[in-house]
């Protein structure tokens, strides 16, 4: 195995670890982040497979795999930036851009994309020697269009002071310009190593870190429970109005709830799912479990199902 194959193996392993860690540990998950991390893992897997190829057909197939991930990366990054910069977009935009990505991918697989390809070996690593055809301009123009859109988003966020701090804007700018600079340099240099395999990982970590920091900033600065939808409900009676000790304990516990516990209590009454509560309050799942234990203890119940059953009993109309 050549030294470049070892490097590609490392970048592939790192990208897969990031994808797995995100899917297992981060709650609530963002669909575009999952797509971005999957695309980076696919790109690096393609580079690794190409470096290990023994035949021209295998190298070409691996090259197609890398392009398949590469065409998905720009729209994933764009929609992450749209979310981070709090810009709204029409519902039709995601499917249209994904269809465009598929179209560009099909162009990269067409005969007009390359005039000639051959397989060479550099220090034991397979390298695809390519002579581009007229359709090769489609892919650079595709990338440049996305880079222009992302730069525009960053500049708008900075000028309109959408970002929480100047540091957030710097991180966002770096995430965009690292890939732009690396891609531009690769067009001018004759090298056998794809530096984008590394810059993509750096960029996804920048974006994930910024997203998590902004989410935590929003959680700390926003009033707790501001996103829990209000519901018209029958008011609870006072503890003095009920004779059942268990019901009286429940009502007394409601009066001792902290603001966060009160928000979670209201969310349970509106039958929100765990994922919805996590998203609305911007808290981690372990934090919700901690508050639930305190909440149930104060109310004398053991689950949200029992909580709702007691609430229904207290608010049921008298016969």
Image (spheres, rainbow, N blue to C red):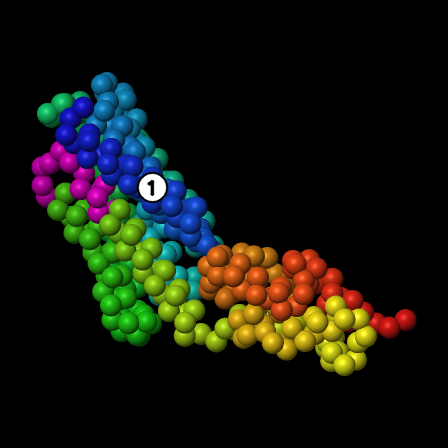
Between 211 and 254, the one lying in front of the other is: 254
Q: Residue drawn at (11%, 36%), measured in percent from left and top?
A: 191
Between 8 and 269, the one lying in front of the other is: 269
Q: Where is residue 2 shown, x and y percent of the image?
A: 15, 26
Would you name the residue on which mark 1 appears? 17
Q: Total marks drawn?
A: 1
Quadrant of the snapshot with the C terminus? bottom right
Between 241 and 279, the one lying in front of the other is: 241
Residue segment shown in magenta: 187-200
Quarter holding residue 132: top left
Q: Where is residue 25 shown, x and y percent of the image?
A: 42, 49
Q: Is residue 80 left or right of residue 180?
A: right
Above or below — where is 220 with respect to 92?
below
Q: Where is residue 50 shown, x and y percent of the image?
A: 24, 28
Quadrant of the snapshot with the N terminus? top left
Quarter holding residue 161: bottom left
Q: Residue drawn at (32%, 60%), measured in percent from left and top?
A: 210
């Amino acid at each position: 195995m050549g030294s470049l194959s070892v490097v590609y193996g490392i970048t592939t392993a790192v990208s897969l670890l990031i994808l797995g860690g995100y899917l297992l540990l981060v709650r609530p998950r963002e669909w575009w982040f999952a797509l971005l991390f999957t695309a980076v893992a696919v790109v690096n897997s393609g580079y690794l497979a190409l470096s290990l190829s023994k035949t021209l057909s295998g190298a070409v197939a691996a090259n197609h795999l890398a392009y398949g991930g590469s065409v998905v990366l720009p729209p994933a990054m764009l929609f992450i930036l749209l979310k981070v910069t709090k810009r709204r977009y029409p519902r039709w935009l995601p499917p249209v851009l994904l269809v465009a990505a598929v179209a560009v991918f099909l162009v990269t697989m067409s005969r007009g994309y390359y005039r000639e390809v051959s397989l060479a070996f550099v220090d034991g690593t397979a390298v695809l020697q390519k002579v581009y055809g007229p359709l090769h301009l489609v892919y650079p123009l595709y990338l440049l269009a996305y880079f222009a859109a992302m730069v525009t988003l960053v500049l708008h966020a900075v000028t309109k002071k959408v970002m929480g701090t100047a540091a957030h804007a710097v991180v966002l700018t770096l995430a965009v310009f690292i890939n732009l600079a690396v891609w531009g340099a690769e067009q001018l240099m004759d090298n056998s190593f794809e530096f984008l395999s590394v810059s993509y990982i750096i960029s996804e970590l920048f974006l994930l870190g910024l997203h998590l920091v902004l989410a935590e900033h929003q959680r700390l600065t926003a009033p707790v429970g501001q996103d829990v939808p209000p519901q018209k409900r029958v008011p609870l009676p006072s503890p003095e109005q009920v004779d059942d000790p268990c019901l009286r304990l429940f009502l007394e516990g409601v009066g001792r709830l902290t603001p966060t516990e009160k928000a979670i209590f209201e969310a349970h009454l509106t039958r929100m799912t765990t994922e919805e509560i996590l998203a609305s309050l911007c808290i981690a799942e372990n934090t919700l479990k901690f508050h639930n234990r305190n909440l149930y203890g104060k109310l004398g119940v053991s689950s949200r199902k029992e909580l709702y059953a007691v609430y229904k009993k207290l608010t049921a109309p008298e016969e």
